[in-house]
Amino acid sequence: MTAPRLEINLQKIQHNATVLVRRLARKGIAVSGVTKATLGCPRIASAMLKGGVQQLADSRIENIEAMRRANVDAEMLLIRSPMLSQADRVVAAADVSFNTELEVIAELSRAAKRLGRHHGIVLMVELGDLREGVMPCDVENTVASILRCSNIALIGIGANLGCRSGIAPDARNMGELSAITTALEAKFGISLETVSGGNSSNMTWALNASGIGRVNNLRLGEAILLGNDPHQSTPVPGLHTDAIILVAEVIEMKSKPATPWGDVGHIPFPKSHAPALRETVSQAILAIGHQDVDPAGLRPSRAITVLSASSDHLIVDAAGTDMAPGTEVSFGLDYRALLRAMTSPYVAKVMLSNGNRIGGHRTVGPHARSTSH
Ligand SMILES: *Cc1c(COP(=O)(O)O)cnc(C)c1O
């Protein structure tokens, strides 16, 4: 089979979605399935939908357009603030976008008017992680202006924590989001149907908090795709952590000195592992590198150690195992490794459904090109 490749088990992704949707439903929380790490792959999106996610969410309009073209039938949310220059595309392809800038919202309204429709807005509020969001003191004025936009429907408010500064959701910041919701409804006589509390790092909070207030939506990507809770960096009980694995192929296997020789200059990619305390290492080279994956995010399935990597080579300590050229090695991935592998056109994406391969060797996403032979 072609290598390197991601093997994507659609049933496992569906299972993860089903379990998370069911657990959060008990708390009154609906799940938006986040597809951005998959470049908006229609088959993965469909697996999430079969698992019961209420909408699909992506940070890039290109991915939403790709899912529309593939006739994925769902409400679609753009969860990164739209670029002003993309307002027309956003209104044409996304039902709802997450926003923080009035200038952009006004342009979305004009674009929606031209298309004879209304565009939904979730206003993002800054709660301490210092990525996107209107400062809490500015929310009321911003909403007053949004409500004057003729072709905009304010459907809710939201927040994002964890991604820039690692700030955790807690009673204080999530309580503030609920309080802001209730205050806005009272002040403007509106009802905000969506209160979107955050991403996968909110899950543990949502499942364990004594009260979750008004929060009724979470946007989950990593938890569904990798079965991982990014806030704790631990597997979520009951979920598959191997729904997506990476397979790479050995191109060289030699016993070599553990220590390099010659004058040492600049190292383009810093070492990911300390040199072995041995004279020789049975080292294997796999045909994959920084261009395709974040080597630090790889978890080998066998007892080998990743020593270092360059653009196109991954060097591993074979630890006495037989890794002749042509040997395939599989790895689990963290989110950063997954993101890069999904985005690399050199990594084939192989979909597995009920143990059968579907969809050939083709890469996925807006820049898809065939890598089949
Ligand atoms: C990426 C993203 C998510 C999903 O994050 P995961 O950690 O993959 O669940 C949710 N919301 C926003 C705004 C995002 O950018």
Image (cartoon, helix red, strand yellow):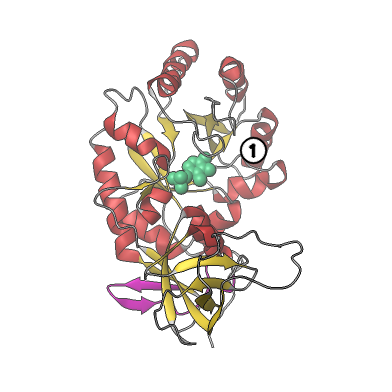
Determine whether 16 is above or below 85 in the image.
below
Q: Quadrant of the N terminus?
A: bottom left
Disc 1 CB within 8 Å of nearest ligand 1 atom = no
* Vertical placement of residue 5 versus 325, above or below: above
Horizontal side, residue 281 vs residue 319: left or right: right
Q: Nearer the viewer, residue 42 or 119?
A: 42
Quadrant placement of the C terminus: bottom right
* Residue 369 visible, this orientation: yes
Q: What residue appears at the point 56 percent right and 18 percent down from the top-left corner?
A: 136
Residue range highlighted in magenta: 345-364
Q: Horizontal and vertical percent for residue 277?
A: 51, 65
Front position in the image: 73 or 3 = 3
Amino acid type for the residue under numbered disc 1: Leu
Figure quadrant of residue 257 = bottom right
Q: Secondary structure at mark 1?
A: helix
In the displayed structure, 119 sits above or below 312; it is: above
Identified at 63% across, 21% down, the residue is: 145
- In the rendered image, the vertical position of residue 196 relative to residue 88, given as above or below: above
The picture places residue 73, in percent across and down from the top left corner, at 41, 56
Tell me what residue is drawn at x 54 percent, y 47 percent. 94
Q: Residue at x 59, y 30 (%)?
A: 130
Task: Work out which residue is located at the far top of the displayed protein and give it.
Answer: 187
Q: Nearer the viewer, residue 68 or 36?
A: 36
Q: Residues within 10 Å of mark 1 (few under 14, many from 20)?
A: many
Q: Can I make out residue 348 in this image?
A: no
Specify whether residue 257 is painted magenta.
no
Residue for badge 1: 108
Does residue 348 belong to the magenta stretch? yes
Give the quadrant of residue 214.
top left
Place of residue 63 in the rendered image (x, y in percent of width and height, measured from the top left): 55, 57
Label tally: 1
